[in-house]
Amino acid sequence: MRILMAGAGATGGYFGARLAQAGQDVTFLVRERRYQQLQASGLVLQTPQGTETLKPQLAQANTLTGHYDLIIVTVKSFALDQVMEDIAPAVGPETLIMPILNGLRHIATLQQRFGEDRVIGGLCKINATLGDNGEVIQMTPLHQLYYGALDGNNDARLQRVDAALRDCQVDTRFSDNIMDELWEKWLLLSTLGAVCCLARGNTQQILTSRGGEALLQGVFSEILSVITAEGYQTRPAATARILELLSDPATPMTSSMYRDLTQGFDIEADQVIGDMLLRAKRHSLATPLLNAVDVNLQVYLQQR
């Protein structure tokens, strides 16, 4: 299977490297700065098991040739419009596109551009970041990759995807209910991002602060009410596990949006929080805590 990994940051770099190491034909689509960095130093993975370096196949938008069987999109959500332009020449009659982005807005955006039958569901769970020299740093052993048809019909095309991905040295989950997995990932991610960005700290600091637990539970409840109104078929055991994970004061957690914010970078405010508020408004749901978070993030973006 010919695979194009759109992006070679922490997510794309890690999972793309594992696919390449498993013998898959993987090309990384990157910008000029990342292209030069990877050409010079290779793709470096720093994992709990040690450091690995591989020489990746690289392409830039103006050097893409031929069609790909699978395009995995791993950029930040605010870069999606440009990436759609970049990958368009690589999309052929049989191409499937698997976005691994935060939120859910990107699915409709990709479907409108490339067709509903081309876009499949995907998400990952990994604690990873890029180091100062562009190395991919996997901070914990967690490295899960979920994928499946958005309508649950994992036909022969999806079976081919699973055959390519399942032996790539990561924990793969071929799901027949990927939409609920996506809703639950957004529940976790948006709650974590909201409380960390609003309080400017990790979950341990928040939970040990006066009112911190009430803040976290309040944000969680608001978000759960929104996604349920939007069509999430509540799985009580799954949502209870998410809340339990977030509420453990012994495990300090932060979101990628919070880490980007503390470094002064652009953030996925509209895609993670703003879109949630738009969906709440559609159902006339009161979400005062999410509104406070959204105002906070808008002010941050104005001040950048």
Image (cartoon, rainbow, N blue to C red):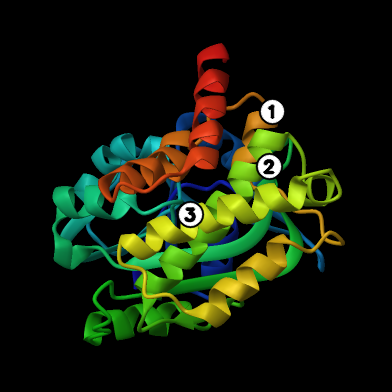
Q: Is residue 11 left or right of residue 119?
A: right
Which residue is tagged 2? 196
Q: Position of residue 204 (x, y in %)?
A: 83, 51
Residue at 31% x, 60% y is 230
- Please give the label number shown on residue 263: 1
Choose the circle earlier in sequence order: 1 or 3.
3
Q: Amino acid at mark 2?
A: Cys
Q: Position of residue 148 (x, y in %)?
A: 35, 76
User: Which secondary structure lies at badge 2?
Assistant: helix
Choose the circle earlier in sequence order: 2 or 1.
2
Circle 2 packing at 10 Å, graded few (<14), some (14-19), many (20+), is many
Q: Amino acid at mark 1?
A: Gln
**Above or below 90: residue 134:** above
Q: Alpha carbon of mark 2 to alpha carbon of mark 3: how far?
A: 15 Å
Which residue is tagged 3? 223
Q: Amino acid at mark 3?
A: Ile
Circle 3 packing at 10 Å, graded few (<14), some (14-19), many (20+), is many
**Above or below 104: residue 178:** below
Q: Position of residue 128 (x, y in %)?
A: 67, 54
- Foreground residue among 280 and 190: 280
The N terminus lies in quadrant? bottom left
Q: Alpha carbon of mark 2 to alpha carbon of mark 1: how far?
A: 14 Å
Which is more foreground, mark 1 or mark 3? 3
Which is more foreground, mark 2 or mark 1? 2
